[in-house]
Amino acid sequence: MMRPKSITFRLTLFFSTASTAVLIVIGYLAGTLVEAHFEQLDLEELRGKLELVRHTLGKVHTPAGMAAVPEKLSDALVGHHVLSVAVVGAGRSLLFKSPGADFPASLIERGTTEDASGREHPVVWEQGGQGYRGIAGTAVTGIAGQPLVTVAVAVNTEHHRVFMQTFHRRLWLAIGASIALTALLGWIAARRGLAPVHELARLTHGISISRLGERLPPQSVPTELVDLAIAFNDMLARLEGSFRRLTDFSSDLAHELRTPISNLMTETQVALSKARSAEQYREVLYSNLEEYERLARMIADMLFLAKADNGLIVPSSEPVDLTTEVRNLFGFYEAFAEEHGVGLTLAGAGSIAGDRLMMRRALSNLLSNAIRHTPRGGSVKVLIEQRPSGEIGLRVENPGEDIAPEHLPRLFDRFYRVDPSRHKAHSEGAGLGLAITKSIVEAHKGSIRISSADGTTRFDIAFPAAGAERRAGPHTTPAQQDWERSGK
Ligand SMILES: Nc1ncnc2c1ncn2[C@@H]1O[C@H](COP(=O)(O)OP(=O)(O)OP(=O)(O)O)[C@@H](O)[C@H]1O
Ligand SMILES: [Mg+2]
């Protein structure tokens, strides 16, 4: 995948593109307006001169007076060397023409450049490398019966052209320089704006495993980065928690292995300290075997958890009738429960799609825990229910001393036991059972919660509705749900 462009580059590009677009529009507008202004000035001058010629002609009353017109006009045009005038009489006879522009025939023929609404439409032409703009109009002389004459006036626009060329050149140069400047300023602004990000990166660099407790100060970063800093701090907190649990786990593990191994060593040393009968050796071996079994169980449990951590526990998806499973487990624990004087009851029914052996293992741990913690005469209750949402709920509850709230969130941690001293008496296991139960439930996409209050401890498991995404709606019949749950 291509690496995304840097933010500085993108911001600079955006700034320069935006300013280029704006400046080009402004430049174009300025050029057009100045040009239009010149045209307007020219037009006003041309109109003025046209009126002047009309006025002069209007004052001629005799054909002889006509002869004096060129001189009068020449006088009137003194100093206006950029202006040219021509007066054309009937039959295209040239009555007067000032030096300068040669009027194009089209202009003369047209008679007038004014349209019906009185708007002037100047004619533009070029001659001898010079630009001209001209208008024409009719005029009447004071001579009775004389037909209309055509008056054409033109202005040399060369000085405008030269000015506009310089103007355009300077304008575009200024625009080019402004674009370069905005790009530079944009780049500086982007870099300065991103400085807090670099600062954040610098702070982040300083955080290592040994300094996981450090946090970014959200109050000292700009508003836009507060969310990032908070999210980062949350991530650090989670990492710190996981890391602490991992470290605890390693030391717990060493601890848990040390006790049985030192037991084994002591027993073996004692046995070897003098000659013993075969019967005595057998006894020692039996006792050792028990310890080995505990160790093997612990190692198998840890392997299972390690696999679960790596997502390697993939439960099969066969229909598991929870009612039958719980009944079978009741059978298995009957003797154990009787020994503790504890009753076992089951209510409700339900089944899920999952892994029968894993489910048995999870339920077995919940049941053995519950039986162990139920006072004599109490009874362990299991309730299976189908919730309206389609979820399957399984609850295992037992009467007994409340578990203090501070223990509840950690109960599913590995090797966590409420009262570790009891472990020494071999009355409790290694403290891996609930961690395994949780992994199994989660591998089945379910969730497990614990609550302990008013003398009752409850474990609530919720399994998602089987084939929830395929469910037709809330009105599916149990038969349909069974059919869907079986994955057909
Ligand atoms: N129903 C319960 N009532 C009261 N305390 C419980 C109950 N279930 C579990 N606990 C507490 O939670 C701790 C952890 O249980 P978990 O099943 O993980 O370990 P364990 O039973 O001690 O050992 P293992 O299951 O590995 O043989 C237990 O040591 C016990 O203190
Ligand atoms: Mg247990």
Image (cartoon, grey):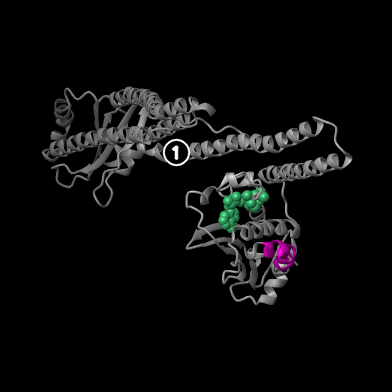
Label 1, on which residue?
Answer: 228
Q: Provide the major secondary structure of the magenta segment.
A: helix
- Label 1: few (<14), some (14–19) or many (≥20) C-alpha neighbours in 10 Å: some
The answer to which image quadrant residue 70 occupies is: top left
Left or right: 158 as drawn, with respect to 372: left
- Up the image or down, 382 lies above or below 21; here it is below
Q: Is residue 9 magenta?
A: no
Tell me where residue 58 appears, x and y as whole percent.
13, 41
Mark 1 within 8 Å of ligand 1, using the beta carbon: no
- Up the image or down, 109 lies above or below 171; here it is below
| Residue 439 visible from this viewpoint | no
Tell me where residue 217 appears, x and y as whole percent.
38, 33
Tell me where residue 12 appears, x and y as whole percent.
43, 29
Identify the residue shown where x is 13% and y is 36%: 56
Tell me where residue 172 appears, x and y as whole percent.
37, 26
The magenta-colored residue range is: 325-339
For the C terminus, the quadrant is bottom right
